[in-house]
Amino acid sequence: MNIVIRSTFIHFVILLSLIFISASKLWADPPPAYEGRRLYVSYCQLCHGTGGKGDGPLAVSMDLNPADLTTTVRSRSDTILTKIITGRGGQTITGRVRHNLLSDAMPEWENLFDESQIKSLIAYLRFMSTTKFKLQGDPKAGMQLYQKYCHVCHGVEGDGDGIMIDLIGIAPMDHTNPNETNALSNKDIVKSILDGKGRFMPAWRGILTQSDAEALVSYIRLLAH
Ligand code: HEC
Ligand code: HEC
C-alpha cells in the first residue's frame, strides 16, 4: 500500500516538473528594448520626456535642461552610456571625472540596475534615437497577444522559428530583424495582421481589434532592438 502511494506520488512529482519545464521553456525573457522601455518609463521619463526629447514634466523646474536623448545618444558608445547611467568611473574616453561631461543634475543610478537592466536601458535609448516609427499601441498588451497568437509560427523570441514552421513548411517574417520590420510602416503591419498576408499569415480580423493590432506593432518594433 505504502509503495503504491509512494510511486504514485513520484509519478505526480515527475509530471509536475515536466509541466513546469515545458511552461518555463515556452516563454523567453522579454526583449531588451521592451524591458528597457519599462525601466525608462519608471526612472527616466519624468525628466527626459516620453519621447526622450528632454521635455519631461520635471524639466521646467530644472536649471539645466535634461538632454535630448534622441540626438545625443547616437554619438555615445555603450561603455560611455553605461558610465553615464551608473555614474561609475570617468565618463569620457580619456577617463576624466563625470563633471567634465555631465553636471550632477543627471542622477547616478549606481546600485539600482544590474548589468542586464543597463543593457536593456541602452537598447531602448538606441531604439528611441533611431526609430522613425511611433509606438502607438501598448507594448505590454502587444506582448501578451504575441505570446498567445503569434509565437507558434513567429517563434517565442520572434525570430521566425516557431513550432509550426516545419509542419506547414513556411518561413514567417523574422520580427527581430530591423531591416525587415523597418521596411513596413505601422499602417502596413496593422493591415497585414488584420487582413493576413500570403498563404500562411492568417487574417486576425474578428479575433483582434484595430487597437490589439496597434499594440502588436509596438511590441514588434521593440522586438527588433
Ligand atoms: C532628475 C532628472 C533626470 C532623471 C530622472 C534622469 N536624467 Fe538623464 N539627464 C538629466 C540631465 C539634467 C542631463 C544633462 C546633464 C548635463 O548636461 O550635464 C541628463 C543627461 C543624460 C544623458 C547624457 C546625454 C548625453 O549624451 O549628453 C543620458 C544618456 C541620460 N541622461 C540618461 C538617463 C537615463 C537612462 C535615465 C533613467 C535611468 C535618466 N537619464 C534619468 C536629468 C535626468
Ligand atoms: C500560421 C502561422 C502564422 C501565425 C500564427 C502568424 N503568422 Fe505572421 N506570418 C506568417 C507567414 C508565413 C508570414 C510571411 C507571409 C508572406 O510574406 O507571404 C508572416 C508575416 C507576418 C508579417 C509581415 C507582413 C508583411 O506585410 O510582410 C507580420 C507583421 C506578421 N506576420 C505578424 C504576425 C502577428 C502579429 C501574428 C499574431 C497575431 C502572426 N503574424 C501570426 C505566419 C504566421
Image (spheres, rainbow, N blue to C red):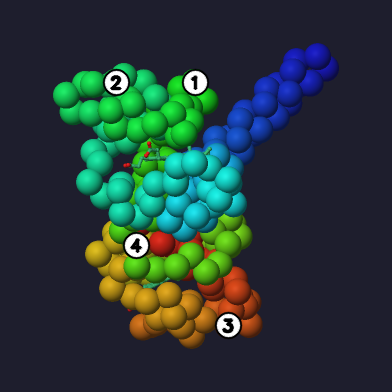
Q: Which residue is mark 4?
A: 131
SS at badge 1: loop
Q: Amino acid at mark 1?
A: Asn
Find the distance from the CA under tag 4 to the CA under tag 1.
30 Å
Residue ID at (21%, 21%): 95
Q: Is residue 72 above or below residue 97?
A: below
Label 2 residue near ligand 1, CB within 8 Å: no
Q: Label 3: which residue?
A: 205
Name the quadrant containing residue 211.
bottom right
**Which label is found at residue 111?**
1
Q: Write down which quadrant ligand 1 falls in.
A: top left
| Along the line of sight, the residue nearer the viewer: 142 or 12 | 142
Mark 2 lies on residue = 97
Circle 3 packing at 10 Å, graded few (<14), some (14-19), many (20+), is some
Question: Mark 1 or mark 4, which is nearer the start of the sequence?
Answer: 1
- Pinpoint residue 74: horizontal percent, then vertical percent: 26, 49
Residue 64: mark in rendering: none
Horizontally, residue 202 falls left or right of residue 84, namely: right
Instruction: Compare residues 169 and 94 and report the one nearer the observer.
Output: 94
Question: Measuring 52% from the left and 69% from the top, which residue is drawn there?
Answer: 136
- Pointer 1 or 3: first along the chain: 1
Name the image quarter holding the N terminus. Answer: top right
Alpha carbons under labels 2 and 1: distance apart = 19 Å
Q: Position of residue 203 (x, y in %)?
A: 50, 81
Measuring 43% from the left and 75% from the top, which residue is drawn there? 186
Distance CA(mark 4)–CA(mark 3): 27 Å
